[in-house]
Image: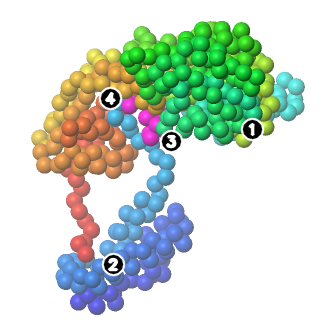
Amino acid sequence: MSNRLLRSLPSIERLLERPLGSRLSAELGRDRVRDLLREITAELRDQLTRAPHSSANFQESLTEEVERMLARRAAECAQPSLRRVINATGVLIHTNLGRSPLARQAIEAVAEVGANYSNLEYDLSRGERGKRETHCQELLSRLAGSEAAVLVNNNAAAVMLVLNTLAEGGEVIVSRGELIEIGGSFRIPDVMTKSGATLREVGTTNRTRIADYQRAINDRTKLILRVHPSNYRIIGFTERPSVQEIAQLSLETGIPSFEDLGSGCLIDLSPYGVKDEPVVAESLKSGISVVSFSGDKMLGGPQAGVIAGSRKIIDQVRANPLMRALRVDKMTYAAFEATLRLYESNTADLEVPVIRAIALTREEIGRRANLFCESVNQSTNGEFTAKIEEGASVIGGGSAPEVKLPTMLVVLEHSALSSSSIVEGLRSYRIPIIARMERDRVLLDFRTVGQEEEDIILDAIKGIAQPAPQTAASV
């Protein structure tokens, strides 16, 4: 019987001419559909050859089976590689999930500039060529409390550019306790080497005093570097010079000071429980010559690195030939400016998603979680049970590692399915839902879930509880 089925495998050309093949060829391209059909028929041929007894299970024609497989694979091919997901983990700045989502105003600004021509490098007042670096400069300088500022493509680029501009061929003094590594194997010593500067370590891992910096200064010293420990904390018997001490030493010696702030907060978030994250303007007000920070972490904007400080230093940075290689595009400028304007209007806590999520109280999250649990328990015929319990959200993204924001978690359990199966089912939904799994339990934290996303999660849970009937023939 298997030989008869093998002979009845439809030809690829005939399949391409059928309605499904013609439609998919128009959507994906005829060559792509032909390749998919070759893969499918090869698999069926191999399966029938290796397990001829399974051919008895065929109740429908091979043509219908091939077309079912083709439809599924074509749908998978049509999915973009970079897709929207729902973040139900409670990690606010989730690096793997794209860090901070953009505010509505930033998205609108990107759409406007991206869909049309713009004055990216055109001076409208003079009617001649302009410089892209002028965009956002005044607004950013005002919010950061700096004389000048410039954008590059991320904070790693900002650190590299400042070190190369100010310290190439010379020494940079930095505490041993600040030689950090962040995600993606980004190490301060490695970046310093690539910048052309020489590292001069001072102090010890847990204790460094201002006197250590003073003793290290010599004729080759070009920069004093202070690095904010974004993704770790050393506790116990510790000491490090304050920003004011570093700034004073810089003033006394004439050697510029540079602080890598990492996340970069434009406003004080301590009222929401996020402490020890420095506000950009405070560092510059203390006398630090130049700072750098990320745009897509605590600030809540697009991926970018900000360099802010004295006009003299920023002008030097702009003149560096590396600036062209590290500059940002028009859509980044558009999103960044729109985000900054929300800070200027004092509406960041309402409009910037990451700030809004930080500001949510446990009670607000608990009310939503309670209603959601009721919906799950009522709509899944007892297959799923949902309850709430106390938990904690985290900032993530190498920011505020000790901060735990009180939250209420939705705990999902199924009468027959394992936790890993539930997590996989949520992740396989048409809009993938990324949940947290702890102690073999599935947890959803609504601090990072938009209210408009709750119905999507509920639909996914219903789909897991009542899966669609299997229609494909068993081969």
Q: Is residue 136 left or right of residue 65?
A: right
Instruction: Please tell me whether mark 2 sits on a helix, a strand or a loop.
Output: helix
Residue 38, image x, y percentages: 44, 77
Tell me residue 350's x, y (percent): 46, 18
Mark 1 or mark 3: name the one nearer the start of the chain: 3
The front one of 375 and 186 is 186
Q: Earlier in the sequence, mark 1 or mark 2?
A: 2
Q: Regarding mark 1 in the picture, which secondary structure is present there?
A: helix
Instruction: Determine if the magenta segment contains residue 230.
Output: no
Judged by depth in the image, the label closer to the viewer, 4 or 3, is 3
Residues at discs 1 and 3 in contact (Cβ within 8 Å): no
Query: What residue did someone put label 1 on?
Result: 322
Q: Which mark is residue 184?
A: 3
Q: Earlier in the sequence, mark 4 or mark 3?
A: 3
The rendered magenta stretch, by its main secondary structure, is classed as: loop
How far apart, in angstroms, are the residues tagged by discs 4 and 3?
A: 28 Å
Question: Could you classify mark 1 by the number of other residues whose Cα lies within 10 Å: few (under 14), some (14-19), or many (20 or more)?
Answer: some
- The numbered mark at residue 44 is 2
